[in-house]
Amino acid sequence: MKRYIPVIKFVLLTALVVFLFSFTQKRNANRNLKRINVEFLDENDPFITLATVNKLLVQNNDSVTGIPKETLVLKEMESRLLGNDMIRDAQVYVTVDGVLGAKIEQRNPIGRIAASPNYYLDEDGKKMPLSSVYAARVPLITGRSTTNFSEVTPLLIRIGEDDFMKQSVVGIHVSEKDKVTLKLRKYSFDVIFGNVENMDLKFQNFKAFYKKAKEDNRLQGYKTIDLRFGKQVVATKIE
């Protein structure tokens, strides 16, 4: 009989653990929600309000207070959030103390397409509608790129990563022959960028030319700055 005592103890201990786990799970499921906690993971200004996120989570309920946790279907909540045009990714969870949480990653606009109506281009190269909550300060895109974004998406991403170019470039025009031209904030001359190859070299050449021309007080006298010729910058003066 003694040899069965360890087995009996193990069985009883296992049964106790299962009972306590089931009891805790049931009690936790029967608890009502207390509040909602929404966290925006990106550094962008909100393109969607907290009220909209809350409404997507609880739908027809006026308040989260009193909603039983057992009635929640988190995957459906995530699907509703992902169905919003401003949201790139979302994770929904519930804590043991009754907090319904949502981690939101917004879409990141990198350009604004001049079309009818206007809309953004996001960092994934996809169309994104304008937000009624916040207007992003991004370059305006004109020309053939209003239907084809393959040539401007990597350029816009690279511009956003460079502080000088981000502050300077306010527009991008793409011609029929894929010639990209940059429009600047402070000066009226066009920067002929060509295709999107060798972007870092072209940025470097332009910044070096800009610095020297500014020191010599000559920036106002140019019509175009052409960056298409390798390490050479070709500047055309206003006649």
Image: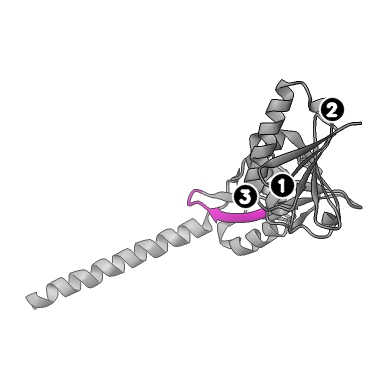
- Is residue 96 on the magenta stretch? yes
How was the colour assigned to the protein in this rendering?
Answer: one colour
Residue nearer the viewer, 106 or 136: 136
Dominant SS type (magenta): strand
Residue at image location 80% in from the left, 29% down from the top: 186
User: Which residue is at a point 85% across and 56% down the rendered structure image?
Assistant: 144
> How many marks on residues?
3
Rendering coords of residue 183 (x, y %): 81, 39
Q: Single out the mark in the foreground, 3 or 1.
A: 1
Q: Would residue 114 appear left or right of 19 to someone viewing this image?
A: right
The residue that label 3 is drawn on is: 104
User: Which class describes the residues within 10 Å of circle 3: few (<14), some (14-19), or many (20+)?
Assistant: many
The residue under the point 41% across, 62% down is 23
x and y, in percent, of residue 236 in the image: 83, 36
Percent x, y of residue 38: 61, 45
Q: Which residues are magenta?
A: 88-97
Which label belongs to residue 221?
2
Q: Residues within 10 Å of mark 1 (few under 14, many from 20)?
A: few
Res. 137 visible in picture: no
Q: Amino acid at mark 1?
A: Phe
Identify residue for label 1.
229
Q: Say left or right for 16 vs 146.
A: left
Asked if disc 3 and disc 1 are in contact, CB closer than 8 Å, the reply is no
Element type at marker 3? strand
